Image (cartoon, rainbow, N blue to C red):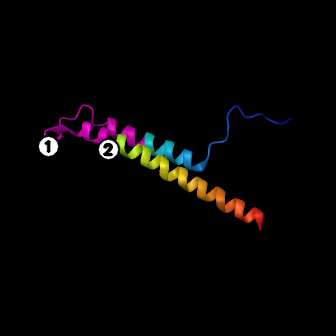
Amino acid sequence: MVKEKQFFEMSSGDKFTLVALLVYAVITFFFVQSGATISKMAVFGWLMGVFMFIAPIISLICMNLDYAKADKIKEKANK
């Protein structure tokens, strides 16, 4: 009996992006109750600002790597 999958297969780049962003978010939320500041702004605020900047960059890099891998597979198949 073939077991049917409930969801689509997630690419390795998407898996890495998801794990990296979740780890960063967990680390960032450790600083919610912290009184530490940098330039009179809470460290949590700085980390959230960096998170908004870095999340799309990580996603785009991983997506680019997935497309490059797919292109290499297509090239090998065409030979």
Quadrant (top left/top right/bottom left/bottom right) for the C terminus: bottom right
Q: Is residue 42 magenta?
A: yes
The residue under the point 26% across, 37% down is: 44
Q: From which residue to which does the magenta span run? A: 23-51
Q: Which residue is mark 2?
A: 50
Residue that extends furthest to the right in the rendered view of this protein? 1
Q: For label 2, count other residues whose C-alpha is less than 10 Å away and answer few (under 14), some (14-19) or many (20+).
A: few
Residue that extends furthest to the bottom in the rendered view of this protein? 79
Which amino acid type is marked by label 2? Answer: Val
Does label 2 or label 1 sit earlier along the sequence?
A: 1
Report which quarter residue 5 is drawn in.
top right
Query: Dot 1 lies on which element?
Result: loop
Foreground residue among 26 and 60: 60
In the rendered structure, the answer to whether residue 63 lies left or right of residue 74 reads left
The residue under the point 55% across, 45% down is: 14
Q: Residue 27 in the image: x percent, y percent? A: 35, 41
In the rendered structure, the answer to whether residue 77 lies left or right of residue 69 reads right
Q: Which residue is mark 1?
A: 39
In the rendered structure, the answer to whether residue 42 lies left or right of residue 48 reads left
Which amino acid type is marked by label 1? Answer: Ser
